[in-house]
């Protein structure tokens, strides 16, 4: 199983942008990973500007399992502190297994400027365990984000992660951290139907094109449908539940080659 | 009609103040944006110094629309010939403008055009520009400006790394290295009293050139210029370095020309006569004296220039002029000022009502013989010491039709002619149609006219441009240009054909949000390298480009997103792509004299054919359009800080990081080890 996991991990590193993003950046509850222009959800490590849209303090946990392999799971947690001046967020994620794992922590600050636009910056520390040297190596990298409400129904989002192309160098290997440029749009047909699209470009990988719809079917139930293209077309389906202060999201993606990818998150929003 | 004017005035009152403030605050940026539109689809290296100085001058000395003349309005390069004619015609027919927003009533002008004009024009009673100038006025009201600019690449380049003396071939290798330090710096002094008296001194040293040393001491390039205007019979008098532009540019145009750009109607060069020179370009100017005298309806200009130019001279002849202006190595120094060129020229222009006729002649004399190394493509290039070129140009306006053209001939009998007309069939539609024919034998030194390539010879073509305003807030610009090279060109060893098509849609959604989509198709032919055929083989090259730009501002923040991509196909090879995307954020501190611009962008153009150019903000009067080829990202931070009313500082730092595993950047002496290139730039402006 470890061999399979290793092979898959290698594939994930070198074949596809989504894999590169996903190994280091945890998935978001936005369908098809269209979080960069999702003003309703702040997802750890996606677009720090979305932190500025917090209306109350919240925390959450995410778990993602790739292709039904425990070794390819990402666990993440986040807490966002609301403030009228500047919102602050702290995030953490863990990917991998005992022989190889990656951890990342970040602290972000964002502000919403009169609902016209929001800007955010985040400082991340990434560390990985190299079993060959039985040591951890890490590095800092920044992340900047922007969200602009061009009209009441239309907004755009931008995120640059690791713009300086930081790397981790060891005696034997240089690990390049993904440098990702993301641009996304969101359009509200009505308060209950939102359409989002996004383009991601990890510098050394192919483009990822994603689009998805959030439909508020019932007061407490949102149905999500979307897909993205990255060498293959990957359909995505999800549901969101809201009960009191809790938000629960369940998403799944069906990769035609690698199989099923599942995601679950629980968020708790404190009362205002 | 007066009621209409009054209504326009009332409507505009609500927004006038805010818009005016908006425009003034962004004059620098507006000039750069206009220039970007010119250069975005134009491969020519246009001199930004002159462009900037000209517009900056008008931002400080606004054109009074009620007193202006066509030749003055033509100096606003973003106005098309038709728009200029319409403004002049409107004021002639209906009298002086009461408010700037009456411009909305003029055919062919929309709010975007008017906003562009705002920083440069006023409406008012105006002043008498022929008033006698006194020394006292010069001393009291003259404006002095001093600019100092310093650039440095932060990574060490191969050209600055000398080999240790103990190694073999050290002397030979070290002799190829740069003789100076890695700093670029320049000094500019400007004095002007309105536009009547202008004096300028420019000194520049490029990176790698020696400032203090055995081979050279001082700046590498000096330029001094003085210009007087409207002094009695003298319309213009220039001494020192100057430029001269007449007609359509077939004989004489040393200023930036009008080429293919998204300003699809602006294809007619502006007849600006003699003017001072203030650029750091070390080639494209005259050095001597010139004057324009007004004699009734005739403007008579004459000038004489005598200067040393750079060339690779051997045994009394040279094969080509060396025009980079770089003198960084011993080899480059050996080309410096090796040939003397004398130029004498003149122009007579007759203007009567809506008719203008002119005659331009120029004679150039080298002290060495120009003898190009013959190849197929340059078979007809000029060879010899002396050349004379002369041409006739004309412009006529009849109602909504404007006809223009020029025909020129060199002393070997070679002909060049360009003729066209612009027309307004409907108030929402402006058209321009133009035909050009430049004989392969026509090759003159100071021509710069509308053409596919920068060299005005060996080309015939037909251009059709249209600007349509189908709905409010929308503008559609389109051009089609079909051309033919009847003889081989550089890179195309046989006669060939080509065509360009451009379609741009501009949408000004709100006052603070604007966007455009630009689609361009280029089809031409190029050599196929490494074929087994004894005869040259050419193949079609197709390029499709698409660009989307979105600009928006909120309060003190302004943002810009650009997405651009292209597809290129050579012969039957697969299509290759190039792409670039950027995010700009600017912040102007209103309570603190600081302005900050930041950009992050990535580029993905693995093939050279897919290279992408992207304009970026820079220090005052500098303009950057870096070329992106490869895979990587770039970011920059640009700061402007006004210490006080007299002293301003600019600082820019930019870095490009390649992610395509390259271990060195550039080549030769410019080689940088690693995958990063960082540049810092500093500029100081002192007004006194």
Image (cartoon, coloured by chain):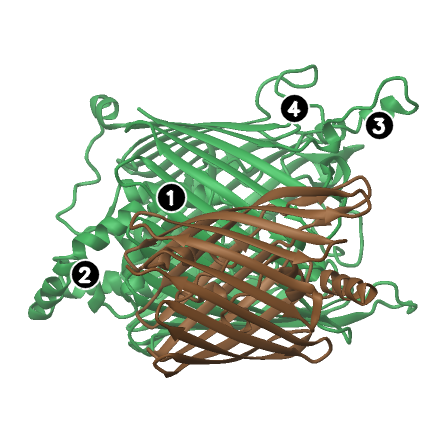
Marks 1 and 4 belong to one chain: yes
Disc ID at residue B54: 1
Residues behind callouts 3 and 2 on a single chain: yes
Q: Residue at x 77, y 38 (%)?
A: B668
The percent coordinates of residue B387 (x first, y second) are 63, 46
Spatial CA distance of label 3 from label 4 is 17 Å
- To which residue does mark 3 refer? B173
Q: Which mark is residue B127?
A: none
Mark 2 highlights which residue? B101
Q: Which chain is brown?
A: A
Give the x, y percent position of residue B138: 25, 25
Q: Residue at x 66, y 43 (%)?
A: A138
Q: CA distance from mark 4 to mark 2?
A: 53 Å
Q: CA distance from mark 1 to mark 2?
A: 24 Å
Callout 2 environment at 10 Å: few (<14), some (14 to 19), or many (20+)?
many
Q: Which of the pair B164/B384 is nearer the observer?
A: B164
Q: Is residue B178 above or below residue B272?
A: above
Res B669 quadrant in image: top right
| Label located before the other in sequence (1 or 4) | 1
Q: Which chain is green?
A: B
Judged by depth in the image, the label closer to the viewer, 1 or 2, is: 2
Write down the residue under mark 4.
B181
- Quick one: label 1 or label 2, which is nearer the N terminus? 1
Tell me what residue is drawn at x 63 percent, y 16 percent: B212
Q: Chain of mark 2?
A: B
Q: Residues within 10 Å of mark 3 (few under 14, many from 20)?
A: few
| Mark 1 / mark 3, whichever is N-terminal | 1
């Amino acid at each position: 199983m470890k061999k399979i996991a290793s092979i898959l991990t290698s594939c994930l590193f070198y074949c596809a942008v989504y894999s590169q993003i996903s190994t280091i950046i945890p998935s978001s509850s936005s369908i098809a990973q269209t979080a960069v222009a999702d003003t309703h959800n702040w997802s750890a490590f996606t677009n720090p500007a979305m932190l500025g849209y917090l209306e109350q303090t919240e925390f959450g946990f995410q778990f993602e399992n790739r292709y039904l392999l425990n070794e390819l799971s990402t666990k993440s947690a986040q807490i966002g502190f609301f403030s009228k001046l500047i919102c602050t967020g702290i995030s953490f994620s863990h990917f991998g297994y005992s022989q190889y794992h990656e951890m990342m922590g970040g602290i972000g600050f964002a502000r919403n400027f009169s609902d016209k636009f929001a800007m955010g910056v985040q400082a991340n520390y990434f560390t990985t365990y190299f079993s060959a040297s039985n040591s951890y190596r890490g590095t800092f990298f920044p992340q900047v984000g922007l969200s602009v409400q061009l009209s009441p129904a239309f907004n755009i989002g931008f995120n640059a992660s690791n713009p300086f192309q930081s790397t981790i160098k060891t005696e034997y290997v240089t690990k390049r951290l993904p440098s990702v440029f993301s641009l996304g749009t969101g359009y509200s047909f009505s308060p209950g139907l939102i359409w989002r699209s996004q383009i991601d470009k990890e510098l050394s990988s192919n483009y990822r094109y994603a689009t998805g719809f959030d439909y508020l079917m019932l007061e407490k139930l949102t149905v999500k449908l979307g897909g993205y293209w990255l060498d293959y077309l990957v359909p995505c389906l999800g549901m969101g539940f809201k009960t009191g202060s809790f938000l629960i999201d369940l998403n799944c993606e069906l990769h035609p080659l690698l199989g099923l990818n599942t995601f679950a998150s629980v968020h708790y929003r404190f009362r205002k | 009609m007066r009621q209409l004017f009054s209504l326009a005035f009332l409507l505009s009152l609500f927004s006038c103040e805010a818009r005016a403030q908006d425009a003034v605050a962004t004059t620098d940026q507006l000039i750069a944006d206009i220039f970007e539109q010119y250069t975005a689809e134009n491969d020519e290296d246009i001199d930004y110094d002159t462009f900037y100085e000209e517009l900056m001058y008008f931002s400080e000395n606004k054109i009074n629309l009620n007193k202006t003349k066509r030749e003055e309005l033509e100096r606003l390069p973003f106005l098309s010939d038709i728009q200029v004619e319409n403004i002049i015609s409107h004021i002639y027919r209906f009298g002086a403008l009461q408010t700037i927003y009456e411009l909305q009533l003029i055919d062919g002008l929309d709010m975007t055009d008017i906003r562009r004009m705002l920083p440069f024009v006023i409406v008012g009673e105006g002043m008498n520009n022929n008033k006698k100038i006194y020394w006292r006025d010069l001393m009291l009201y003259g404006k002095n400006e001093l600019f100092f600019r310093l650039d440095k690449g932060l990574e060490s380049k191969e050209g600055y790394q000398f080999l240790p003396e103990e190694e073999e071939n050290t002397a030979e290798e070290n002799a190829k290295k740069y003789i100076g330090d890695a700093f670029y710096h320049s000094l500019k002094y400007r004095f002007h009293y309105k536009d009547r008296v202008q004096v300028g001194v420019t000194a520049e040293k490029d990176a790698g050139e020696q400032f203090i040393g055995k081979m050279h001491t001082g700046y590498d390039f000096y330029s001094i210029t003085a210009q007087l205007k409207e002094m009695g019979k003298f319309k213009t008098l220039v001494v020192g370095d100057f430029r001269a532009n007449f007609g359509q540019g077939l004989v004489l145009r040393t200023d930036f020309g009008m080429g293919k750009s998204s300003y699809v109607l602006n294809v007619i060069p502006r007849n600006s006569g003699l003017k001072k020179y203030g650029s750091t370009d070390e080639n494209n100017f005259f050095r001597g004296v010139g004057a324009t005298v007004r004699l009734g309806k005739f403007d008579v200009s004459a000038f004489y220039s005598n200067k040393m130019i750079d060339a690779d001279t051997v045994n009394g002849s040279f094969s080509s002029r060396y025009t980079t202006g770089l003198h960084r190595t011993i080899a480059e120094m050996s080309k410096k000022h090796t040939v003397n060129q004398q130029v004498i020229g003149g122009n007579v222009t007759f203007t009567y009502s809506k008719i203008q006729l002119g005659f331009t002649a120029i004679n150039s004399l080298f002290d060495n013989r120009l003898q190009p190394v013959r190849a197929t493509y340059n078979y007809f290039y000029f060879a010899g010491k002396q050349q004379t070129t002369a041409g006739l140009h004309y412009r006529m306006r009849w109602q909504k039709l404007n006809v223009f053209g020029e025909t020129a001939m060199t002393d070997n009998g070679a002909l060049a002619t360009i003729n066209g007309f612009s027309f307004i069939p409907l108030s929402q539609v402006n058209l321009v149609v133009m035909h050009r024919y430049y004989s392969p034998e026509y090759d003159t030194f100071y021509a710069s006219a509308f053409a596919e390539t920068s060299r005005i010879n060996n080309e015939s073509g037909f251009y059709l441009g249209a600007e349509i305003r189908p709905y409010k807030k929308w503008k559609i610009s389109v051009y089609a240009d079909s051309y033919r090279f009847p003889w081989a060109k550089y890179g195309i060893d046989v006669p060939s054909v080509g065509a360009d098509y451009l379609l741009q849609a501009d949408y000004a959604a709100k006052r603070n949000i604007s966007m455009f989509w630009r689609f361009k198709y280029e089809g031409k032919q190029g050599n196929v390298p490494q074929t087994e055929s004894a005869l040259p083989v050419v193949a079609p090259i197709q390029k499709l480009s698409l660009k989307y730009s979105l600009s928006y501002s909120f309060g003190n923040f302004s943002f810009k997103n650009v997405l651009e991509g292209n597809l290129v196909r050579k012969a039957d090879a697969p299509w290759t792509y190039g792409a670039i995307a950027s995010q700009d954020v600017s912040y102007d501190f209103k309570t603190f004299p600081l302005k900050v611009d930041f950009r992050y962008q990535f580029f993905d153009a693995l093939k050279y054919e897919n290279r992408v150019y992207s304009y970026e903000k820079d220090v005052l009067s500098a303009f950057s359009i870096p070329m992106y080829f490869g895979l990587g990202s770039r970011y920059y931070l640009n700061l402007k800080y006004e210490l006080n009313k007299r002293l301003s500082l600019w600082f820019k730092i930019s870095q490009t990081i390649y992610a395509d595993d390259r271990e060195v950047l550039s080549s030769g002496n410019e080689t940088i080890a690693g995958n990063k290139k960082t540049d810092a730039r500093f500029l100081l402006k002192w007004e006194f």
